[in-house]
Image (tube, rainbow, N blue to C red):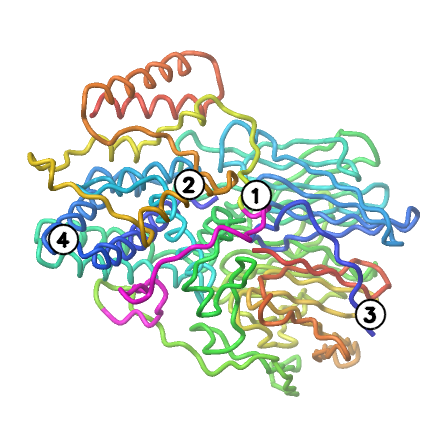
Amino acid sequence: MSSRTLPLLFINLGGEMLYILDQRLRAQNIPADKAKKVMNDIITTMFNKKFLEELFKPQELYSKKALRTVFDRLAHASIMRLNQASMDKLYDLMTMAFKYQVLLCPRAKDILLVSFNHMDAIKDFVKDTPSVLSQVDETYRQLIEMYTPLSSGEFQLIRQTLLIFFQDMHIRVSIFLKDKVQNSNGRFVLPISGPVPHGTHIPGLIRMFSCNGEEVKRLQFRNGGNYTGVLREGSFEMFGERVIKLGTNMYSVSRPVETHMSGTSKNSATERTISPNPLAKEELNMLARLMGGMEVQKPGNADSGFRVNLFATDEEEEEALISRPDEFSYDVIKIQATKNQQANAELVKIMGDFTEEAGEPCSSSANSKGDDLLAMMDGL
Amino acid sequence: MYHKEKSIQMKSSASALYNNLSVLRIAPRSLTYFTVVHANMVNMVSASWDGLNYSHRQLQSKEANVATSSSLIMQAAWCVLPSRDILVLTSQKGIQMYESDGSIMVYWHALDTPETQTAQAVFARGIAAVREKYICVGISSGSMLVFDVPIKGSNITLSEVLEEHKESITDLASECSGSLECIADMVSADDSGNLCVWKSGEDFQLLNKIPGFDMSCSSVKLWKGTVVAGYGTGQIRLYEAVTGIVHAEVNAHARWIYSLDIAPFSGLLLSAAEDSLVRVWHLTMTPETNSVEVTSQTIPGRNLTTPRTHRQTLTASLPLSPSRSCTCITSV
């Protein structure tokens, strides 16, 4: 639908990922210098100039599988390692958190404020590293340039595109369950209390007019809710009070990050059935490709690497992997984010398959996808 | 006055789209058809009035297997013409028209999609049957396509392209009171809240343009010459179609209105919004003073709002019939 959705999806999911990783790094008592390095490396990769250029181009959203691949690579852009189960859990939390934020946004335009909340936090993570900071600032400028001129209807289209992307995802997150913002069936609760969005009136008034515009009658009705006033407008600039709290860091060391697999209904995470397209099956989107090709500062000393666990114990992590219901599997394309010979050979072979596909007569959209990927390979 | 009937489970969830529920009552067969859009599919269920038989069908977006997310359906709606009922699906690729039960596709119109992706999205949205033989569909560019539909068969032709709106069309509606005296046949709404009022014919004629206030009008209805418009601010406004005079303004909802529907014989208006509430209003026309009165309807004994723990976004529809039944669906 909207071709301007991907940057917001990526930045907000990335922001949530950083919040969760930050919490886990502290909870696992990872030494401060290593933790900082991980955060810096990931943020550097996220805001890579070439990557962002690609991200901000008008395009349709990637498939769930393709987007998951991008984040897999992003999470491994540093010395930190995550096992499959932890990566699955991380991704569940990221996506449900952003889904919640999109759904609860008072106005469709407030999605931009949510994005700024994430950006503000990211900026804080790298405030001591000027090189990354300048990239983050550049991204603010691009967001402002691209999104502030959009109308309310265009923002609503972006919002609808995101909601369709997250449709049928009902993983229960313990923080949300505890705060009673999510029901036991995984659906989020829409409040009918609190302030109304900026630009909206509190429901309750009917005004009727005569032909010459004079108000002739007023009626009040009970709105059934408990609305308390109108929200102020947050700042859409590089700095300023955002007003909206969605998108700020809801994790702290004391609030564990938990998801619940059992009891979630089978219907909730079905992949849409679309006739398999050979290109889609092996879809290596440009972003994932770019990310895989980026230079990462690998330490000479292998001991510097470490593993982060999203669960309380290693046993729990293993158990989670075994017991994860099939319908929740992300079916990720496992390609190493390193530049070793073998990995590259594998990639080249897959690209070779694409070359053959692109040569055959097929629809224009399939062709252009293949062409773009080939062009990217040349560039790497 | 109102009682909740048996719930009908659709095959999959409803997508977050404006006007995402269409209802067709087929009295001779004691059946009601319901359609709900789910991403690149339309779920259709045919329910017998005795509540005993349900039959499901799914319609795919054309060219759904070529791309993944770029063939999403924006809307599905029944167009009731004197001689036939046509089910229209509008998507990012084009417009599909089916024979009444969804079994046969009778017409396909492809949208012009640019070679390289542009910042402006391309899709069709907004569907209305107008008078005896027209089906009008809106486009994201602001254009509207007018199709001429024969009494039977698939010889549907594009009769005219109306270029009046500059923003994406959100909804279209035709005069639903059944009265032949009304001058205005159709109203169109767009993302900036502008409304255009039309008279149908070989060449459609623009009767009036009602300016918006930069706030998207997501759902619109035309009843007895009155335009009823629902906005992203949660407000409902009533205008006299031909003159643009404002009859009434209702601070109806705390969030974006997703659909409106009118029961033409009783003057009941139903509005559903992202605040999870469905509200019922009563419209009374007084021709002598050229005024419309709006009152809120309470539903004694039964609250149409769902309990806090189950609240989700709703879109709703009132069937065009004398009966007062209304249908609500929940989406995620």
> CB of mark 4 within 8 Å of CB of mark 2?
no
Q: Amino acid at mark 4?
A: Lys
Residue hosting label 1: B39
SS for tag 1?
loop
Q: Please report the bounds of the magenta region as a residue range.
A: A240-268
Residue at x-position 52% and y-position 33%? B112
Relative image position of residue B197 (x, y in whole percent): 65, 58
Nearest to viewer (mark 4 / mark 1):
4
Tell if the residue under mark 4 belongs to the same chain as the one under mark 2: yes
Outermost residue toward the right in this view: B28
Say yes or no: labels 3 and 4 on the same chain. no
Label at residue A36 = 4
Amino acid type, mark 1: Ala
- Which numbered disc, 1 or 3, marks the residue that appears first in the sequence? 1
Q: CA distance from mark 4 to mark 2?
A: 31 Å
Q: Nearer the viewer, residue A298 or A119?
A: A298
Dominant SS of magenta comes to loop
For label 3, count other residues whose C-alpha is less than 10 Å away and answer few (under 14), some (14-19) or many (20+).
some
Against B6, is B141 above or below?
A: above
Q: Which quadrant of the figure has residue B314? A: bottom right
